[in-house]
Image (cartoon, rainbow, N blue to C red):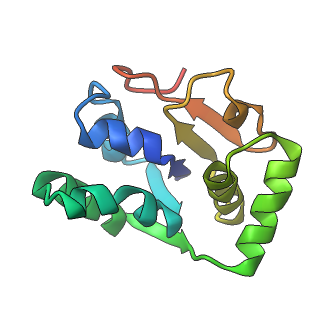
Amino acid sequence: MKRTYLDSSVLIHAVQGGDGGGTVALLEDPGREFVAATFLKLELLPQPSFHRRARELAFLEEFFSRIVAWEHASEVLLADALHEAAQVPLSAVDAIHVAAARRLQADEFVTGEKPGKPLHQVKGIRVVFLAAGSARGK
């Protein structure tokens, strides 16, 4: 079973219908299980909640129900994120997600950020670019 950490960018594209079904293909892959940091909820839920976008909320809640392991906010996670950000010039949130993916022993980190961005410089975890319109990372 492949442990997969989905970046918020992948889920945002999917919920807005802009990923051409790539995330749907990932979600339907029986050889995957999903892990995430609780910070993902903070990134993804406020806008559809505030604007009462029920379809988006239902999609996200269904995805969250499939998470097999959560990394909760903690001083240890933040220390790990600071370490990640010192290795590669990551944003604070990306550093948190990379640190969480490592702590959760993810096999891959799937993102919508294009190759060449700092996230793709991370070492020791496979970072996969899910291009809009693709069913698998490039």
Quarter of the rendering occupied by the C terminus: top right
Residue 105 pos. (x, y %): 68, 60
The relative height of residue 4 versus residue 73 in the rendered view (above or below) is: above
Specify the farthest residue to the bottom.
Answer: 74
Picture residue at 69% right of the left edge, 21% below the top? 116
Picture residue at 61% right of the left edge, 76% below the top? 73
Residue 128 pos. (x, y %): 58, 32
The relative height of residue 51 versus residue 72 in the rendered view (above or below) is: above
In this rendering, the count of numbered labels is 0
Residue 127 pos. (x, y %): 65, 36
Q: In the visual, does 89 lie left or right of 59?
A: right
Picture residue at 81% right of the left edge, 60% below the top? 82
Q: In the visual, does 27 lie left or right of 33?
A: left
Picture residue at 30% right of the left edge, 44% below the top? 28
Residue 33 pos. (x, y %): 46, 56
When asked about the image quadrant of residue 49, the answer is bottom left
